[in-house]
């Protein structure tokens, strides 16, 4: 009888374990159903784990107009402020200055300086340790200088900006950025400009 009792107890224990298996599976499924919706958005957000980016760049540039000197070695300084608007898409405002110096003749202007502000939509292509992108936007341009006949000149107009960018990660919130850009400004003097610049960007 004792042997039968022990067998019966063992059988009933095995039956309880078999009964518990579906319950454990159900609890596991419930836990996953609660946890996964919280994990998936975090994994997606990690792709663009910042909303704003601020950069400071320095480089060189010049004018492509025939009557300008054609040199692209004039100093450029620019600041950028960008906001992520969608996956791999940013809206970026750029404020910059291209200084031609006192010895350069830009369409008859001496001591010329081009200042600009552009707003552009930028699309990024992701790589493991860097992004590269392209942007197209509108800008406001002012070419100020001194004309030997007219005196001081402030030539203002709208324009278009096309650029290519590279963003190389240093840390999670700091990167090295490079830009190549072309600008067509509707000005009475020089119209076409090119610039190359590099610097640092902070993401937050």
Image (cartoon, rainbow, N blue to C red):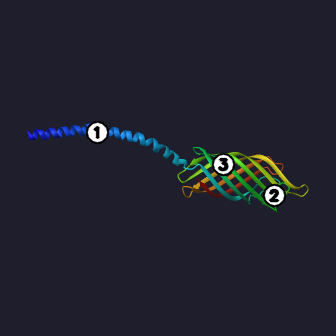
- Dot 3 alpha-carbon crowd within 10 angstroms: few under 14, some 14 to 19, many 20 or more: many
Total marks placed: 3
Question: Which disc is residue 21 wearing?
Answer: 1
- Residue 110 falls left or right of residue 57: right
Q: Quadrant of the N terminus?
A: top left
> Which dot, 3 or 1, sits closer to the camera?
1
- Label 1 and label 2: CA atoms lie apart by 81 Å
Name the residue furthest bottom.
103
Q: Residue at x 72, y 58 (%)?
A: 76
Give the image location of residue 3, x and y in percent: 10, 41
**SS for dot 2:** strand
In the displayed orientation, state which residue is furthest to the right.
Answer: 149
Query: Which label number is shown at residue 92?
Result: 3
Q: Are marks 2 and 3 in contact (CB under 8 Å)?
A: no
Looking at marks 3 and 1 on the same chain, the residue that comes earlier in the sequence is marked by: 1
User: x, y (%) of residue 183?
Assistant: 74, 49
Residue at image point 64% right, 58% down: 199
Position in image of residue 176 (x %, y %): 60, 57
Q: Identify which residue is drawn at 58% across, 51% down.
A: 131
């Amino acid at each position: 009888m004792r042997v039968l009792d022990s067998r019966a107890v063992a059988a009933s224990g095995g039956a309880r374990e078999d009964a518990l298996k579906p319950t454990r599976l159900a609890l596991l499924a419930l836990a996953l159903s609660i946890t996964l919706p919280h994990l998936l958005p975090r994994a997606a957000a990690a792709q663009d784990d910042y909303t704003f980016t601020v950069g400071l760049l320095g480089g060189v540039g010049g004018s492509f107009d025939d009557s300008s000197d054609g040199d692209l070695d004039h100093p450029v300084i620019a600041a950028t402020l960008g906001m992520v608007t969608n996956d791999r898409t940013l809206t970026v405002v750029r404020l910059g200055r291209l200084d031609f110096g006192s010895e350069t003749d830009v369409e008859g202007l001496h001591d010329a300086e081009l200042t600009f502000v552009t707003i552009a939509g930028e699309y990024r292509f992701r790589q493991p340790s860097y992004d590269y992108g392209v942007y197209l936007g509108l800008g406001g341009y002012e070419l100020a200088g001194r004309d030997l006949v007219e005196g001081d000149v402030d030539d203002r107009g709208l324009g278009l900006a096309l650029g290519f960018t590279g963003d190389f990660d240093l840390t999670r919130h700091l990167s090295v950025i490079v830009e190549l850009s072309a600008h067509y400004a509707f000005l009475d003097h020089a119209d076409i400009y090119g610039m190359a610049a590099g610097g640092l960007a902070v993401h937050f």
